[in-house]
Image (tube, grey):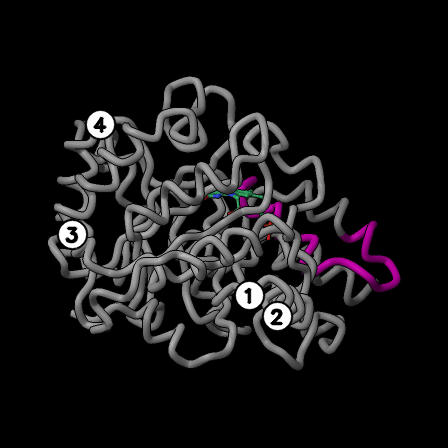
Amino acid sequence: MSNFWQKLKKNNKPFFVLAPMDDVTDVVFRQLICTTAKPDVLFTEFTNVDGLNSKGQDKLMPRLLFEPNEHPIVAQIWGQNPENYFKTAQMLVEMGFDGIDINMGCPVSKVVRSGSCGGLIREPERAKEIILATREGAAEKIPVSVKTRIGDKEIATEEWIGFLLSLKLDALTVHGRTVKEQSKVPAHWDEIAKAVALRDKSQESSVNPDPDKVGTGLIGVKETVIIGNGDVISYQDGLVKAKTSGVDGIMIGRGVFQNIFVFDPAKTNADLSVQERMDLLTRHTQMFVARWGNTKNFNILKKFFKIYASDFEGASELRVNLMETKNLEEVESVIHNFNHG
Ligand SMILES: Cc1cc2nc3c(=O)[nH]c(=O)nc-3n(C[C@H](O)[C@H](O)[C@H](O)COP(=O)(O)O)c2cc1C
């Protein structure tokens, strides 16, 4: 099987990735983004490997649903037990994912205290154990990557990112903040640039330039694909940040809430008429209800409403009314009243 990260890198222009976002980037939202402006790579929401290997598996499986038009699609995982990473990696290969990403950045205190996600920055040896277990489960069939931050309490790019690079990951997403900083300060893109420099100045030559060989740990440090993340608000902004930092790819998360076409170099929400925005909102709601029925809380959908109901006369009142809705029919009725009010 091939390593899509290396193929994207070889194009010699920055590629774009939709960030994993819990309760946002489920199959419904990814399907929507595939029809508005599809990025080069999609990630699932983070999914817990310990839960996946427990009686509660059924509850978590919907997080791993994807459709054929989403390739390349990466499953993001997190958890505690290396053995569960191993088993989950085997399962993800079977399911047809193109890559596996390990979350080593989530700053939620309960998760960090449990030693998972951002908590792994304090425990490099455990982080290494988890990477090796995942790699073993992936069995050279699909690439294994990590998404992390630049330190725990203090910026520690050289130590932490340097350590991860020494493990010869297929790809590494660097979110330019420490765990402690959460999202409270602007992302340190100078530190992301430092991560790229660390990779580039590595003395390791490429032991394995073959893009079809993956996850073997034989990929030289120089081969690790680096993706920068944090505060990218537009495609053009991404191009500038890629140029100044030297990253191979750009990951965008919250930017999709400002512009659902953020992965299209030439289009923004503002190019849509109000009617077109309402049509998109209706379609999104229909897709959510068709896929999830009553199995997902309708309120989860409401965080998307501001994408469509913003920046036109009456938008804030429309948003207030939409926030009161409880189902598709009520959303359609609010939109009807707005159009004919
Ligand atoms: C609602 C929400 C949920 C998130 N869930 C995840 C997640 O499941 N896994 C992960 O690695 N990062 C998660 N993140 C962090 C984002 O992937 C990204 O690193 C962060 O938002 C910074 O990028 P941005 O400035 O482009 O949004 C989440 C962020 C938000 C806002």
Between disc 3 and disc 2, the foreground one is 2
Whether label 1 touches label 2, CB < 8 Å: yes
Q: Indicate the position of residue 311 as horizontal and vertical percent values.
A: 82, 62
Mark 1 or 4 closer to N-term? 4
Residue 122 to residue 338: above or below: above
According to the picture, the residue beneath numbered tag 3 turns out to be 138
Specify whether tag 1 is near ligand 1 (CB below 8 Å).
no
Residue 278 in view here: no
Q: Secondary structure at mark 4?
A: loop
Mark 2 or 4 closer to N-term? 4
Measured in 3D between alpha carbons, the distance from the residue under mark 4 to the one under mark 3, in whole angstroms, is 16 Å
- Identify the residue at image location x=19%, y=41%: 132
Residue 240 in view here: yes
Between disc 1 and disc 4, the foreground one is 1
Is 108 on the left or on the right of 331, as rendered?
left
Q: Which residues are magenta?
A: 298-318
Foreground: 30 or 133?
133
According to the picture, the residue beneath numbered tag 1 turns out to be 246
Mark 4 or 3 closer to N-term? 4
Foreground: 225 or 116?
225
Mark 3 or 2 closer to N-term? 3
Q: Residues within 10 Å of mark 3 (few under 14, many from 20)?
A: many
Q: Quadrant of residue 278?
A: bottom right
Q: Indicate the position of residue 203 as horizontal and vertical percent values.
A: 35, 58
According to the picture, the residue beneath numbered tag 4 turns out to be 81
Q: Indicate the position of residue 209 as horizontal and vertical percent values.
A: 24, 72
According to the picture, the residue beneath numbered tag 2 turns out to be 243
- Identify the residue at image location x=84%, y=64%: 312
Is residue 62 highlighted in magenta?
A: no
Q: Residues within 10 Å of mark 4 (few under 14, many from 20)?
A: some
